[in-house]
Amino acid sequence: MSNAISHEETIAKRILFIMVNEQGLRAGDGMSPDNLAHDLARHQITGADQQQAVRFAKDRGWLREGPYGELQLTETGFAVD
């Protein structure tokens, strides 16, 4: 059994890093998908990789969609290192 980290997980963790360390977000805070896409493009993360990684993070409970369409950081996502 391999413990290798998938490409989607690597990008998802970069998303969390950007949200927490660059944007200063905490659990429950959100970011518009457009602003997040802009930040990710700055880090040379393509649109397709962004979509797959966001889906991965949502599936893991790291991100959720907020009431206004923003991507919210969950407690679980905030705790990921």
Image (cartoon, rainbow, N blue to C red):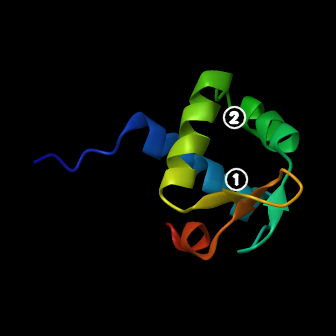
Q: Is residue 47 above or below residue 59?
A: above
Residue 62 occupies quadrant: bottom right
| Amino acid at pointer 2 | His
* Percent position of residue 1, x then y: 10, 48
Q: Which residue is mark 1?
A: 18
| Amino acid at pointer 1 | Ile
Residue at (83, 53) in percent of width and height: 70
Helix, strand or loop under label 1:
helix
Evaluate whether residue 20 shows in this view.
yes
* Percent position of residue 39, x then y: 79, 40
Check disc 1: other Cα within 10 Å, few if <14, some if 14-19, many if 20+: some
Q: Is residue 76 above or below residue 12?
A: below
Q: Is residue 4 above or below residue 21?
A: above
Q: Is residue 43 above or below residue 29?
A: above
* Percent position of residue 16, x then y: 62, 56
Apparent side of residue 46 relative to residue 22 in the rendered image (left or right): left
Q: Nearer the viewer, residue 14 or 63?
A: 63
Check disc 2: other Cα within 10 Å, few if <14, some if 14-19, many if 20+: few
Apparent side of residue 71 relative to residue 12 in the rendered image (left or right): right
**Residue found at the far left of this picture:** 1
Mark 2 touches mark 1? (CB < 8 Å): yes
Residue at (55, 47) in percent of width and height: 12
Residue 19 occupies quadrant: bottom right
Question: Distance of mark 2 from mark 1, alpha carbons?
Answer: 9 Å
Residue 27 occupies quadrant: bottom right
Q: Which residue is mark 2?
A: 43
Helix, strand or loop under label 2:
loop
